[in-house]
């Protein structure tokens, strides 16, 4: 995750508050073209699908609402752990080959991590009424 406030303040040369601690990485050097983006931590997100979301009409175009990127891996999964889909993003950047069945331990590990993250954060502004 990029800490937007910290990154933008850094680009603008503005100091953040004394006790400010963002929850992501500062990407100022990347935005200024001085470095390549290198993620140090896993990236997790919720697509925000709830009762107000207009789901695609074609079921093939629907996906679970949570995602985690960990190195070359991307896992999609629902908050209850169902419908896990694992992709090797170095070999399958268009996410066409779900290889979750080939890596059950990795799926379990990443599912647990992103589902716990979701449970801890779902009441902090994330869409939750799935």
Image (cartoon, grey):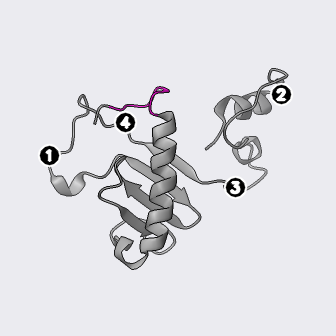
Q: Callout 4: helix, strand or loop?
A: loop
Residue 13 marker? 2
Q: Nearer the viewer, residue 117 or 74?
A: 117
Left/right of residue 27 with respect to residue 60 in the rendered view: right
| Residue at the spot of label 4 | 48
Query: How many C-alpha atoms fall within 10 Å of the one at disc 4: few (<14), some, or many (≥20)?
Result: some
Q: Earlier in the sequence, mark 2 or mark 3?
A: 2
Compared with 1, 36 (above or below) is below
Asked if the residue under mark 3 is in contact with the one under mark 2, i.e. CB atoms within 8 Å, the reply is: no
Q: Is residue 67 visible?
A: yes
| Residue at the spot of label 3 | 40
Q: Earlier in the sequence, mark 1 or mark 4?
A: 4
Asked if the residue under mark 1 is in contact with the one under mark 2, i.e. CB atoms within 8 Å, the reply is: no
Residue appearing at x 74%, y 49% in the figure: 33
Residue appearing at x 33%, y 69% in the figure: 96
Residue 17 rendering spot, x and y as whole percentages: 81, 20
Q: Cα distance, mark 2 to mark 4?
A: 33 Å
Q: Earlier in the sequence, mark 3 or mark 1?
A: 3
Badge nearest the viewer, 1 or 4: 4
Numbered range of the magenta stretch: 122-128
**Quadrant location, the C terminus:** top left
Q: Cα distance, mark 1 to mark 4?
A: 17 Å
Residue appearing at x 76%, y 54% in the figure: 35
């Amino acid at each position: 995750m990029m800490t937007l406030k910290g990154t933008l303040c850094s680009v603008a040369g503005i100091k953040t508050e004394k006790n400010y601690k963002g929850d992501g990485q500062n990407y100022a050097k990347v935005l200024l073209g001085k470095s390549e983006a290198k993620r140090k931590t896993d990236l997790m997100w919720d697509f925000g699908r709830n009762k107000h979301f207009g789901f695609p009409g074609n079921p093939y175009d629907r996906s679970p609402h949570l995602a985690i990127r960990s190195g070359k891996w991307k896992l999609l999964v629902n908050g209850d752990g169902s419908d896990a889909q694992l992709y090797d993003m170095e070999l399958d950047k268009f996410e066409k080959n779900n290889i979750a069945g080939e890596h059950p331990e990795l799926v379990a590990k990443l599912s647990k991590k992103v589902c716990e993250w979701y449970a801890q954060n779902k009441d902090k502004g994330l869409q939750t009424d799935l």
